[in-house]
Amino acid sequence: MPLTRAVRALAAGALALLAGCGSTAPAPSSDSAAPSAEPDAAALRAAALTDADLGPGWTVTLMNPGQGDTTAPREKADRPACQPILDAVSPGASGSGPLAEADLDIARADDGRRSVYAGLLAFRAGRAERIRAELDQLLTVCTVFHSAAAGGPTTTHRLQRIDTPTPEGADAATAFTLTNESEGTALVQRALMARTGEVLAVFTTVGSPKEPAPEPDRQVVRAQLARLARH
């Protein structure tokens, strides 16, 4: 499967799952902030990247989340504490979702390895940072774990934190790679989760042990975070 299609298949249903991350830290008192602080769907779509933000050679497709969903059965981790890591990068059903979501396929015609899948998720006040912080904590706990879907093969997951500076325009960021090994094949996913206010922007690429997943294109990350900061 080409990498751009693999990114879509792996990440299209994943972003809503972030809202279902298990609570490993107390909720900030700001979770009950007034609704006026909460981004809505129209505001999130307005903050999404466009071709014009990136210039010639780039194509940005804004997808409609939840339509035509054919995601595979949810993979269940053998260590419940590690399920949020799996949910952050794998398709499946979520018990709850963000207030609004915008999913982007950002393709570079002359260099497929610069292509990125991006998802924007808006939450109630305090929830975005809570999710990012919980995920950040799990990166040191779930370095190796296993999972399987009902009736499916067992997959071994190897997780590695990537030290990353907080990109300009973000309040905080977490980055990692997740190597998934099953039935003699391996897929490497690389993710950067950046928080801007009450929005999580998740940038994802896919690779293999022979062709590692590249760092999400910095031009894409910078341009998307700049738009979020302006809206």
Image (tube, helix red, strand yellow):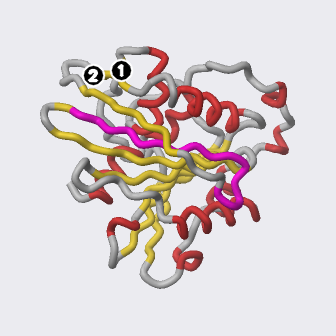
User: How packed is label 2: few (under 14 Cα within 10 Å), some, or many (20 or more)?
Assistant: some
Closer-to-camera residue (50/216): 216
- Disc 1 marks a residue whose amino acid type is Lys
Q: Residue 199, can we see it? A: no
Q: Secondary structure at mark 1?
A: strand
Please tell me which residue is depicted at 54% across the width and 34% down the height of the picture.
18
Residue 148 is tagged as 2
Locate residue 149, reporting x and y percent: 27, 23
Magenta-highlighted residues:
167-181
Locate residue 155, reporting x and y percent: 25, 27
- Disc 2 marks a residue whose amino acid type is Ala
**Which image quadrant: the C terminus?**
bottom right
Is most of the magenta stretch helix, strand or loop? strand
Check disc 1 and report the residue beneath it.
Answer: 76
**Side of 227 where 66 appears, left or right:** left
Closer-to-camera residue (136/35): 136
Closer-to-camera residue (58/139): 139
Whether pointer 1 and pointer 2 mark residues with C-beta atoms closer than 8 Å, the reply is yes
User: How packed is label 1: few (under 14 Cα within 10 Å), some, or many (20 or more)?
Assistant: some
**Side of 147 where 51 appears, left or right:** right
Q: Is the residue 166 above or below the residue 60 in the image?
A: above
Q: Is the residue 102 above or below the residue 183 in the image?
A: below
